Image (cartoon, grey):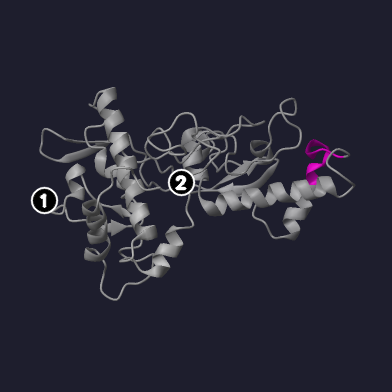
Amino acid sequence: MKPSDWTQADDRRILNFIYRSQAPNTTSRKGAAGSLFPFGGSAGALDNTVPGKAGRYGTNGCDLPGAFTNGWCEGSYAERERTLERAAWITMGSHWVTANHPDVTSGRRRSMQTYRLPDDTFQEIYTLFPGWPPQLYIRDGGGIWGQFMMTARHLQRNPETKRAWNFEDSVTTGGYHADIHSPYYYNAPNGCGRKEGSLSYIDRPNYGVPLRCFLPHPGQCSNLTVSWGASGDAIWRASWRMEQTVACGAQACGMLTALAYRNGTLSDRTLADVPFPELKARLAAENAVTTV
């Protein structure tokens, strides 16, 4: 979707970002210009006339809305609303340019044209465009309150055993860092820059994840498994969210569903009716790592 008041000058700014930042001999979408997310510390980052603010592209740690979050903590609600709208406006415009402008390579245009805003989420509360989230950088939502909830303490060793956490019904493992980004940067009295509110990349032990995290309480729903939105607090889910671990959890969920279907339909045998040893044996046959 192209913003209603998007201009040719805006087109040119985005094209400048793409091609001025292109590394020599780099054509891969994973290269220096592989993402539409420029580095930058202020709204001036989109103005190529500002010295030092020419667009640079990366694929991690430098999202486009992040170029506008300086001053967010001190801003009023009205100022934050304007920040949200400007970030949405420029992000949507940049994607439209990349998907449609003839100066963009056909391969990149085709790739970008596959992306759409969701039509079943953020339809009542959104920023500028239906489907656009009402806050910056929503990556962790829609989780269940399961039969067991993982928490930040499970990212550390069990204080009783002095070992990593394992559970009798563990079906997979996790172990990524609690990757909570810094929301606030400030200058300390000694002149050094400091950041606040982050959980840094600190070595943490792997941990087991119980099947109960993927299952709602039986009284709520008897035939549902959830892997991405597994039951846990926000800090644990910052670790769990990695594609590899989520996929392993989904594999266990799929095996459980297959075992429930084996004797007929799910109405004949609910997920809760499947004895855990059956699932454990199926996981073992596939060489799944379920404990640490």
Q: Residue at x 90, y 47 (%)?
A: 263
Does label 1 or label 2 sit earlier along the sequence?
1
The answer to whether 242 is drawn above or below residue 33 in the figure is above
Tell me where residue 245 appears, x and y as whole percent: 56, 51
User: Residue lying farthest bottom?
Assistant: 25
**Pointer 1: what residue?**
50
Q: In terms of depth relative to the viewer, which is nearer, 252 or 152?
A: 252
Tell me where residue 60 appears, x and y as whole percent: 35, 54
Q: Residue at x 38, y 64 (%)?
A: 30
The answer to whether 47 is drawn above or below residue 158 in the figure is below
Q: Which segment is the magenta one? A: 269-277
Tell me where residue 206 appears, x and y as whole percent: 53, 48
Q: Secondary structure at mark 1?
A: loop
**Pointer 2: what residue?**
204
Q: Which mark is residue 289?
A: none
- Using a 10 Å C-alpha cutoff, classify the residue at mark 1 as few (fewer than 14 neighbours), some (14 to 19) or many (20 or more): few
Q: Residue at x 40, y 47 (%)?
A: 1
Spatial separation of the CA atoms under disc 1 and disc 2 = 42 Å
Tell me where residue 102 appears, x and y as whole percent: 33, 65
Mark 1 is on which residue type? Answer: Val
- Using a 10 Å C-alpha cutoff, classify the residue at mark 2 as few (fewer than 14 neighbours), some (14 to 19) or many (20 or more): some
